[in-house]
Amino acid sequence: MYKNILVPIVFDHEDRGTKALAVAQQLLDTDGNITLLHVMEDIPAYAAAYLPNDVMEKNRSTAVEKLGAMTKADETRISAVVIGGHAYSSILEHAQKNDVDCIVIASHKPGFEDYFLGSTAARVVRHAKCCVHILR
């Protein structure tokens, strides 16, 4: 059983995030905690110039709201965090800074581009300093 579990959430695959949370709850020690983490990818400056000024704040608010709905399952042991950055490096950095002992991450079936670049889940597995559970 794990005391501090991190569950990265991507909103374009909400069903996967819900399944990952359910697995994390099964792996959680009786006095453990789960953190739901959503990473907002940085928008390059050349693209940001064409977006409305408040788009990032609206996206952050939406993410906080959706994560908040997921924490209602057990608000005493599940918390939510929204950060900015690159997905896999931000997940690893957050895990290391917060003494995470397990990451439960959903993954898609690898596509052609993943063989060259690697998926976020694959990169997390290769570089994490803690246990990682992958869901497909």
Image (cartoon, rainbow, N blue to C red):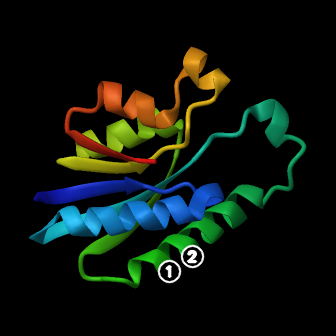
Q: Is residue 54 visible?
A: yes
> Do we see residue 100 in this rendering?
no
Q: Residue at x 26, y 69 (%)?
A: 25
- Residue 14 tag number: none
The residue pinned by badge 1 equals: 69
Mark 2–mark 1 distance (CA, rounded to whole Å)? 6 Å
Which residue position is annotated with label 2? Answer: 65
Q: Is residue 40 above or below residue 15?
A: above
23 lies left or right of 84: left
Q: Position of residue 2 (x, y in %)?
A: 13, 57
Instruction: Answer with the quarter of the image where residue 12 lies.
Output: bottom right
The amino acid type of the residue labelled 1 equals Ala
Work out whether residue 67 or residue 81 is closer to the camera in this orientation and state it: 67
Q: Give the amino acid at mark 2.
A: Glu
Residue nearest the observer in this picture, 134 or 29: 134
Residue 28 as seen in the image, left or right of residue 38: left
